[in-house]
Image: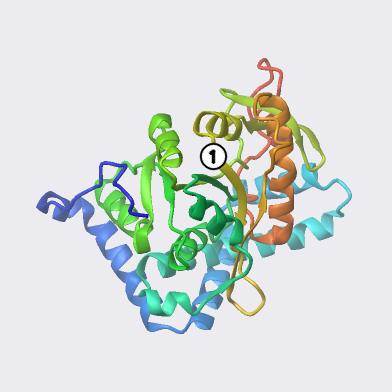
Amino acid sequence: MTHQASFDKPTFSYALLAPKYWGVWLGFGFLALVVNILPYSVLLKIGRGFGKLAMRFSKGRVHTAHRNLELAFPEKTQEEIRAFVIENFKNTGAGLIETGITWFWPTWRFKRRIVEHNVQPLRDYENEGKGVLLCCVHALNLEVTARAFAIIGLPGYGVFRPHNNPAYNLIQYWGRSHNGNLMVDRKDLKKMVRVMREGYRLFYLPDHDYGRKNAAYVPLFAVEDACTTTGTSVLAKLSKCGIVIGSGFRNQEGKYDIIADKIVGHDFPQRDAVAAAAYMNQFVEELILRAPEQWMWLHRRFKHEPDPEKKVGRRYQ
């Protein structure tokens, strides 16, 4: 199936060589050099070490991660939470290195790190010519996951947020569109729907708190009123797509387990936005628990509450 471009692709111009962009070019150039010279095991140690070091300068993020875990897992002790937060920050640093690996490694080297498990539901839908909403979560190595699906022959459209810095934006777009992956603007609902109606896959992340607009307050772990997007049911209803749950977490051998084995079936209540959001959060929980220390706990997941009079982020004060 041949993909059609669905995004105004950033293009290079000599204006991007202006001195104000030199820092971006030098930074990404250095990252590309490092990830291509050093062995993977060393890169992972560097990333994890950097992540732990960053805790000293990211007190706010440390507090956010700690508070998220208190809210989501009230049964955990403070000692358990502190140890978990340290591991989460180590993986956050590793995620920066993994972004460099994803964007700058050649396919032959990247492919060696992929372990394909059950992705048959995606292949079945492709054989039927049916579009798929491939629901993943904000894993710290999400960049790896997206390219890995493309490398095993299952590319898709990523929901793209253009960066304000045009040099960064160009590099980011280029890095995310390897091996057949393409981009669609995050505000362009019509193109998202069209992509799936035409039989393609759309990567979608329903696990963050995106704000009160188009949201429902439903359970997520121990939080009974987690602000959750209703976008999954909207996209499914408009596109008549299949919904598959996917992940690509790093395993203990330093490889990435690519899985897309669960289909959200006919019992998905897509016409009831609140019920659908609650239904999807059960899958979100399952995905996060595959490797909870590799999920983005640094995001204020529970910042919005049902009462609009309550200050945003009150739970984190």
The answer, for residue 198, to whether it is visible in the render is: yes
Snapshot quadrant of residue 187: top left
Vertical placement of 78 versus 317: above or below?
below
Judge from the rendering whether residue 138 lies leftward or rightward of residue 169; answer left or right. Answer: right
Identify which residue, 54 or 31, lies in the foreground: 31
Q: What residue is rendered at 19% in x and 50% in y?
A: 11
> x and y percent of residue 239 in the render?
50, 33
The residue pinned by badge 1 equals 241
Q: What residue is rendered at 89% in x and 49% in y?
A: 75
Residue that extends furthest to the front in the rendered view of this protein? 128
Judge from the rendering whether residue 65 lies leftward or rightward of residue 3; answer left or right. Answer: right
Judge from the rendering whether residue 278 lies leftward or rightward of residue 94; answer left or right. Answer: right
Q: What residue is rendered at 35% in x and 75% in y?
A: 106
> x and y percent of residue 314 in the render?
69, 29
Identify which residue, 294 or 317, lies in the foreground: 294
Identify which residue, 118 or 99, lies in the foreground: 118
